[in-house]
């Protein structure tokens, strides 16, 4: 995107394929973006935001949160939820499929083998924060080999972008379309983009958003059967079927 296009976006003027209320790239902001004719909501975090990023599954009493309203109620007094979205696939009891780590709470096991469904469409990966870089998306077998330090980690699949390339199994004209959400990370690990599509899209289209629209070096799919976003800055808090792991940014407290 050129400097001129960025300026037009900040002035609220549509230019080319981009339409935004606040340009992705501003710290801890959620904004609107258009890429290849599809609309998306993007929440952008920088390294300074990483300590305020959380990953949740249960409240203090061990009850599964399942939705944004319960998460907001479970936050300590004085904390607000800046944004949140579902953070990977889960079993019928809402326990995560694959690795889940939030501080001292580690659940599930890292899954490195293939299998049915999107999770098993190798390569899959792990979104990891607070380690060697503020944000990382690491291929699962590489994660198993190196056992990197992570403050929070959630495994999902498939990877959307792998070292700057789209997942090799993605088809340009695939008719498998869903409202999809996921996370991408910049090459230097200083920026993370959390994105959800406005309308059903296929994997190839969604992967191109991260690689071509946002410049992500690596990106990970979260889900498509259940994709939700809480973003007060966009006057949005999705509801519907219950969720398992939830990732989000808090402020205050």
Image (cartoon, rainbow, N blue to C red):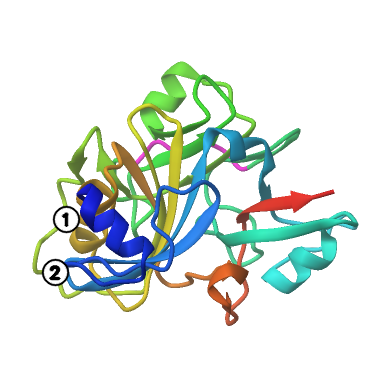
The disc at residue 74 is none
The disc at residue 174 is 2
Region of the chain picked out in magenta, as a range: 108-113
Report the predominant secondary structure element of the magenta stretch. loop
Residue 229 position (above or below residue 192):
below
| Coordinates of residue 121 in the picture (x, y in percent) | 29, 50
Can residue 133 be spotted in the picture? yes
Residue beneath the point at 26% across and 60% down:
206
Label 2 to label 1, Cα distance in Å?
Answer: 8 Å
Q: Mark 1 points at which residue?
A: 170
| Coordinates of residue 234 in the picture (x, y in percent) | 53, 73
Residue beneath the point at 67% across and 36% down:
51
| Coordinates of residue 207 in the picture (x, y in percent) | 25, 54
**Would you say 115 lies left or right of 49 here?**
left
| Coordinates of residue 161 in the picture (x, y in percent) | 26, 43
- In contact (CB < 8 Å): disc 2 and disc 1: yes
Nearer-the-camera pick, 12 or 192: 12
Residue 89 position (above or below residue 73):
above
Q: Secondary structure under badge 2?
A: loop
Residue beneath the point at 60% across and 60% down:
84
**Would you say 57 lies left or right of 204 here?**
right
Residue beneath the point at 20% across and 46% down:
167
Q: Does the magenta stretch include residue 163?
A: no
């Amino acid at each position: 995107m050129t400097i001129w296009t960025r300026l037009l976006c900040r002035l609220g003027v549509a230019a080319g394929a981009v339409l935004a209320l606040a340009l992705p790239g501003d710290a801890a902001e959620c904004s609107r973006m258009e890429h290849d004719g599809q609309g998306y909501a993007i929440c952008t975090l920088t390294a300074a935001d990483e300590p305020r990023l959380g990953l949740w599954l249960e409240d203090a009493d061990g009850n599964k949160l399942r939705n944004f309203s319960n998460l907001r109620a479970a936050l300590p007094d004085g904390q607000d939820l800046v944004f949140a979205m579902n953070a990977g696939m889960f079993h019928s009891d809402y326990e995560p499929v694959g690795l889940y780590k939030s501080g001292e709470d580690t659940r599930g096991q890292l899954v490195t083998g293939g299998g049915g469904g999107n999770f098993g469409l190798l390569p899959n990966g792990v979104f990891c924060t607070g380690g060697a870089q503020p944000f990382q998306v690491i291929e699962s077998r590489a994660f198993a080999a190196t056992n990197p330090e992570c403050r929070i980690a959630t495994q999902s699949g498939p990877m959307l972008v792998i070292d700057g390339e789209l997942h090799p199994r993605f088809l340009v004209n695939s008719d498998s379309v869903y409202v999809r959400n996921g996370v991408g990370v910049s090459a230097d690990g200083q920026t993370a983009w959390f994105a959800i599509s406005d309308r059903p899209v296929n994997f190839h289209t969604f992967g191109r958003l991260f690689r071509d629209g946002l410049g992500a070096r690596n990106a990970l799919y979260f889900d498509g059967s259940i994709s939700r976003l809480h973003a007060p800055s966009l006057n949005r808090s999705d509801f519907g079927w219950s969720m398992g792991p939830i990732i989000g940014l808090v402020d205050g407290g």
